[in-house]
Amino acid sequence: MPTNTMKAIRLHEFGGPEVLRYDEVPKPSLKPGEVLVRVRAAGINPPDWYLRDGYKKLPPDWRPEVPLPVIPGTDVSGVVEAVAADVHGFSVGDEVFGMLRFPSFGDSSAYAEYVAAPASDLALKLARIDRVHAAGVPMSGLTAWQFLIEVGNDHPNPLQAKMHRPVPLNGTTVLINGAAGGVGHFAVQLAKWKGAHVIAVASGEHESFLRELGADEFIDYTKSAPEEVVHDIDLVLDTLGGPTTGRFLRTLKRGGALFPVLLGFSDPEEAAKLGITVSMTQVRSNGPQLAELGRLLDAGTVRVAVDSTFPLADARKAHERAARGHIQGKIVLTVA
């Protein structure tokens, strides 16, 4: 019998993982330009726990207004159930994946049995990658892509006055900090695909994993500080960013570049003195770029690692896993 309700994870208040509640909620309805997707898996990302705790890590004037209760999550894979009349390129029964509405905020989010997704945010899922792995791709894969390969939009950059510009990677030496995580493990593979010599930085337990992904060199940060052992690097992608990212200036050659993924860099005068470009961008939903990533995944050129999976009802446990850190790849929620 058809039903107009579904199961979803909602926040009724901000706080730790314990505020994630498994609720019965109305199914979303389609608007123009949208596709209704029956969710089979949903990827977990840092913005999910930033939302959960009320964006406390963001400067006060950056914190968006969030009406409660709210369903978190951006990354989905699933099956098309319905298509708005003005949408072309998707049909009922298609397998799709995408990052929805980021960085804006919508009323239909990923920790749910169904989402109403902007068609422009979706790509067809190709056969070689399963639904769980597809759900691990969108935000992390697009972040690595838009930092390293192509920004792919002309929106003003809220993180700096100038647009972010990726640098040519062929023949360069690229250091990736936090290389075993979601963004990092994609960045290792994309940089290698583009012809870079890749130095991966992570804890020692991840060395074999990162070498399998193509890392040419590995630094165990628990034994050696990368800024003490490598120099004359062309590019550093610091997936951790934050206030310690300035230490990587001393690893770079004059004319090099430092790309912190998270806010916190505070050494612009030192960077200018060393002739180093420091640049950031904000990842944005982009179906066509996801389609390009999908082709690389289907060809086996790039793969997505899944750290762990949890049923949708156990989203709290998934967030607790994220809080313990040392993640290898992605955490994914599965939807029966």
Image (tube, rainbow, N blue to C red):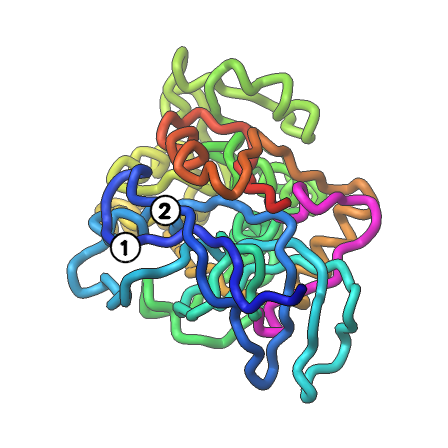
Segment colored magenta? 117-136
Q: Quadrant of the C terminus?
A: top right
Label 2: state its secondary structure. strand
Measure the alpha-carbon separation of dots 1 and 2.
8 Å
Name the residue tied to disc 2: 21
Earlier in the chain: of badge 1 and badge 2, it is 1
Which three-letter amino acid code belongs to the residue tagged 2?
Arg
Q: Are marks 1 and 2 in contact (CB under 8 Å)?
A: yes
Which three-letter amino acid code belongs to the residue tagged 1?
His
Q: Quadrant of the N terminus?
A: bottom right
Name the residue tied to disc 1: 12
Q: In the image as oriented, which residue stretches furthest toward the bottom?
A: 86
Residue at image point 40% right, 69% down: 104
Res 144 seen here: yes
Q: Position of residue 68 (x, y in %)?
A: 28, 63
Say left or right for 150 vs 106.
right
Q: Position of residue 268 (x, y in %)?
A: 25, 51
In this figure, what is the number of numbered marks? Answer: 2
Q: Position of residue 204 (x, y in %)?
A: 50, 14
Residue 289 vs 297, above or below: the answer is below
Quarter location, residue 33: bottom right
